[in-house]
Amino acid sequence: MIERKKLIRWISLAAYFAAAFLVFLLVLFPFDRVKSRIESEVRARTSLELGIARISPRFFNRFLLTDVVVSDKEGKVLFESPAMKVHLPLFGLLRGLTSVNLSGRAYGGDLSLRTEQGAKRRFLSVDANGLDLGSYTLFKVMGIKLSGKTGGTFEMTNDDGKARLWVKNLASRELKIKGFPVPDLDFEQGWIEADLKGDRLTVKKLDLEGKELKIRVSGDLVLRERGSLNLAFKIKPSERLAKEQALLIAFLKNKDAEGFYQFSLGGTVAEPLPRL
């Protein structure tokens, strides 16, 4: 029978060498080559460009990505974060399931993303809180002046997705649609609930509540440039706004018992056609 002291010594030595191996693995691991491989894989498999300044180890299966930038092929920045934490669950790998968890700060708020890729299942989950719309770079590039906070969740399994979003203190300034100026709008709060199946987005609920204007939207659209559009709008302006925009309100004939003017939007995503 092995003596207890010898057993403890052997276990201690084994633990020491295992710890030393992991330390040297993390220190000597070619993270620059991994970074380049990840960027090239994203470039080859998608229509996006991924840029990472540096990958740093935090634990055996935890890493820190510094200065993460996602852009399209034309160089327009779609997403950026100063740092994202990455966790690779080991139990998923043992079951043949590629899984990645990311979390970090972005646009003044918190963002977390979880993705799983298996033989028969693809899963994506995004959870956001307190993102500042005014700091989103793409809006600035497009000349869209928006401010406010947003957050919520989005989950997608294979081709089916569900989104539940909220906005607070949403404001737009100097907005134009098809070249026509839109009055400056302010909303204290709003909610969006939508389902995605393939490329068809069904808006179950879109409510924006403001002192001067209330908006409700429902319907569906196909997320392609020539995809069909079928949305029902209901708007309720305040008395002051109705007088100020009397020329525009005059085009709206259909008014319900709650005081909402109703119209629909058809046509395609590229060429919407209002039906008053």
Image (cartoon, helix red, strand yellow):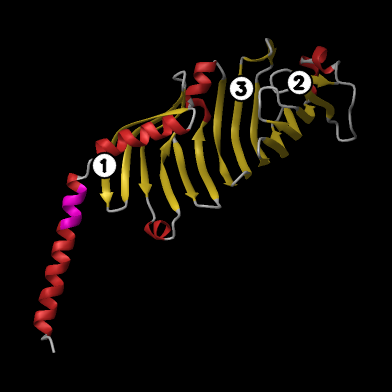
* Residue drawn at (36%, 36%) of the image: 38
Determine whether, in the image, residue 233 is placed left or right of residue 36. Answer: right
User: Label 3 sits on what residue type?
Assistant: Ser
Residue 2 location, x and y as percent? 12, 86
Secondary structure of the residue carrying tag 2 is helix
Front one among 85 and 175: 85
In the picture of the structure, the residue carrying the numbered disc 1 is: 56
Which disc, if any, is residue 238? Answer: none
Q: Is residue 22 magenta?
A: yes
Q: Earlier in the sequence, mark 2 or mark 3?
A: 3
**Which amino acid type is shown beneath numbered disc 1?**
Ser
Which stretch did the figure color magenta?
A: 21-26
In the image, what residue occupies the spot 61% across and 41% down? 165
Label 2: how many residues lie within 10 Å, few (<14), some (14-19) or many (20+)? Answer: some
Q: CA distance from mark 2 to mark 3?
A: 15 Å
According to the image, label 3 marks what residue? 172
Name the amino acid, label 2.
Answer: Leu
Can you give x and y, in whole percent of width and height, for residue 119 in the image?
51, 52
Image-quadrant location for residue 259: top right
Residue identified by numbered label 2 = 241
What is the quadrant of residue 183 in the picture? top right
Asked whether 196 or 134 is in front, the reply is: 196
SS of the residue at dot 3?
strand
Mark 3, Cα crowd under 10 Å, few <14 / some 14-19 / many 20+, is: some
